[in-house]
Structure formats: C-alpha cells, structure tokens
Amino acid sequence: GAGVSQSPRYKVAKRGQDVALRCDPISGHVSLFWYQQALGQGPEFLTYFQNEAQLDKSGLPSDRFFAERPEGSVSTLKIQRTQQEDSAVYLCASSLWGEANQPQHFGDGTRLSIL
Amino acid sequence: QQQVKQSPQSLIVQKGGISIINCAYENTAFDYFPWYQQFPGKGPALLIAIRPDVSEKKEGRFTISFNKSAKQFSLHIMDSQPGDSATYFCAASNDYKLSFGAGTTVTVRA
C-alpha cells in the first residue's frame, strides 16, 4: 500500500498484560514517529526514529513503554504491564527525510483498550 | 503543558459559510505550522502548512493566516461543504516533534 499501515486496528487487553503494536511506514521513509492520542485530544509525541536509531524517546510515559525499529523500516511499540491509563489511540507517522519540519504522514492508528 | 492552544473546541457552520479556527503558541522557536484534518477512525491527514516568513498561504478553499508578532495563526475554510465535517488540529514544530492543539470539531450543516 501507499500509506502508513498499522496493526492491529483494535486491541483489547486486560490490565497487566503486555501488548505489541506494529507500524509499517511508507516505503523509503527515513523518519518514523509514534504519537499517543487520548479521546478528544490532539496527538502527543512519544518517540522518534531516524532509520534504526531511536533519536528521541522523551515522550514515552514510563519505562513500561518500549519502541524499536531494528532494520530501519517496520517499527513496534511495546507496552508492558498495561494500565487503564494506557487506553488511547496509538498513531504512527513517517516522513521522507531526517531533516526538520518535513511533512509527517499518519497511519489510522491502533485503538488500545485496557480492561 | 500544552504548547499550542486551539479554539474553539467545536463549531457549526452552514453549507457555503466560512469556518475559522484559531491557534496560539508561546515557543518562538517554532518555525513550522501544519494543519491536519481527522475523520472518525482515521489518522490525521496533512491539509496545509506554513512557515513564519509568510503571512498567508492558500490552497483551494483552505487558507492559513499567520501573525508572527502575536504568535497566532488561523485556518479559514471557505465555502464549507458537508464533506469538511471533521476534527481539525493545528500543530507547531521547530525540529521533528509536532506539538498539537486540542482540536476543533467542525460540523457543516447542509
């Protein structure tokens, strides 16, 4: 496909379980971003990769959140020991270059619900 | 701490009318100001973006106005159509990290 692809689209987990969310960026895009969007709010930055290097993880809410992009393409956001406050839509975005202020193209997100 | 403040939270406009959404920021290092449109169940889609060396940018029915001294920028949707009903987010950045406003839900009545 031509756009950013995220899977699964919906994920329901019980509190305390671990979850893994996948992002397939647009082919050839150097930069990849994860954002968290709470209900009725704008997206909040979580982390940024340039190729396989994680250059900024300042937005990750706690050490239960972990992201990787081992081969510089697909990325996984993992949340360990999930809590109810982790319920949100997790958005992935990619941009062509690693330069500042390039257009970011978003996927449709994974809606995570923690019971 | 929200770096970009957006208003109104929601608005209703008649078909053919003008929708106006306003945003304000504090960080003078911001140098890139995009607007995104989001439909329910979808990710944000880039609409239009502006840099501070330009006071206005128009693409089709969408216009951004930028006031650097006031640290404010706005989106005008001209000739609003029912298909424009969506949530609109302003954002700002000075590197790679986008700071989003809280969003404005626009409803266009036919």
Image: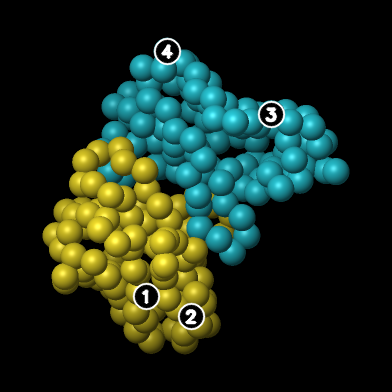
Q: Which residue is mark 2?
A: A11
Q: Residue at x 50, y 23 (%)?
A: B57
Q: Which residue is mark 4?
A: B69
Q: Which residue is mark 3?
A: B78
CA separation in Å, label 3 and label 2 = 39 Å
Give the crowd class for mark 4: few <14, some 14-19, many >=20 residues within 10 Å: few
Q: Which residue is mark 1?
A: A21
Q: Position of residue B59 (x, y in %)?
A: 54, 30
The amino acid on which the numbered mark 2 sits, given as a three-letter code, is Lys
Q: Are marks 3 and 1 on the same chain?
A: no
The residue furthest left is A53
Marks 3 and 2: CB-CB under 8 Å? no
Q: Is residue A73 visible?
A: yes
The secondary structure type at the circle numbered 3 is loop
Q: Position of residue A104 (x, y in %)?
A: 37, 48
- For residue B74, which quarter of the picture? top right
CA separation in Å, label 2 and label 1 = 9 Å
Tell which of A9 and B10 is nearer to you: A9
